[in-house]
Amino acid sequence: MKKKIIIAPSLLAADFSKLKEEIQEVEKYGAEYLHLDVMDGSFVPNISFGAPVISAIRKHSNLVFDVHLMIENPERFIKDFVDVGADIITIHAEATKHLNRAIQLVKSYGKKVGISLNPSTPVEFIKHDLKNVDMILIMTVNPGFGGQAFIGDMIEKIKKLRALDKNIDIEVDGGINAETGRMVKEAGANILVAGSYIFSGDYKKKIDSLK
Ligand code: DX5
Ligand code: ZN
């Protein structure tokens, strides 16, 4: 069965001086998820925002809050993100020595859990965790910044993962636009994160073009 395509605008590319309005716009035009990029300046070479910002916007949106943790040892902060209203919490396979334990911790709060893979991390690395998680996030750029170019080699990786698991949600993140969006969907991805593409204008047209 073909999986429904879900669009997840990345707030990182929104105008931070009017987050409430930005979120309500993408919600109105058919996005289902809001992708929230949390960066610690250590796992990735950039700092973004954390739980207090997510708490402030939670009351203004019914979107599924899809929290992408780009932080070292994410176990330390999972409860904070649960408490501010995260619906899906994604941790990087490279960011903890005890990935399985971190997965169980997210699940213990009744939240959906995702695992993210940097471009160089092979899908085999998480083969034994597929049955334990709701979603795999394939990074199609090196995490840390919006507006980077899509890494073409990731198409083969998405195909490989889809062959390993027909049902799991496969999210892609980085460099997604109408063209790369079509490529990743063909390869088997069903959740598309897009930041600079959507928030650079004409939100409705951009969201429609990714579906
Ligand atoms: C990058 C983040 C992405 C980023 C994507 O580390 O995880 O979610 O916002 O931005 P674009 O869509 O501009 O590549
Ligand atoms: Zn992200």
Image (tube, rainbow, N blue to C red):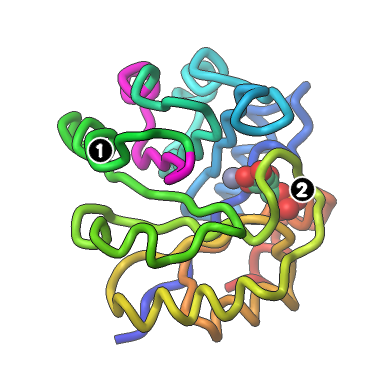
In the rendered structure, the answer to whether residue 160 lies left or right of residue 181 reads left
Quadrant for the N terminus in the image = bottom left
View quadrant of ligand 2 = top right
Q: Which amino acid does label 1 sit on?
A: Lys
Distance from disc 1 to disc 2, alpha carbons, whole Å, reads 28 Å
Q: Residue 197 appears at what percent x and percent y? A: 77, 57
- Magenta segment includes 43: no
Check disc 2 and report its element: helix, strand or loop.
Answer: helix
**Which region of the structure is painted magenta?**
78-94
Q: In percent of the image, x 59 and y 76: which residue is there? A: 184
The numbered mark at residue 111 is: 1
- Res. 30 visible in picture: no
Q: Residue 107 appears at what percent x and percent y? A: 20, 38
Residue that sits furthest to the top in the current view: 52
Please name whichever residue, 8 or 138, is drawn nearer the observer in this view of the structure: 138
In the rendered structure, the answer to whether residue 78 lies left or right of residue 111 reads right
Instruction: Tell me the residue that label 2 is attached to.
Output: 199
- Magenta segment includes 86: yes
- Which image quarter: residue 127? bottom left
- Which image quarter: residue 125? bottom left
* Up/down of 77 relative to 164, above or below: above
Q: Which amino acid does label 2 sit on?
A: Phe
- Which image quarter: residue 82? top left
Q: In percent of the image, x 15 and y 32: which residue is there? A: 108
* Up/down of 133 relative to 181, above or below: above
Q: Does the residue labelled 1 lie within 8 Å of ligand 2?
A: no
Please name whichever residue, 165 or 66, is drawn nearer the observer in this view of the structure: 165
Q: Which numbered disc, 1 or 2, marks the residue that appears first in the sequence?
A: 1
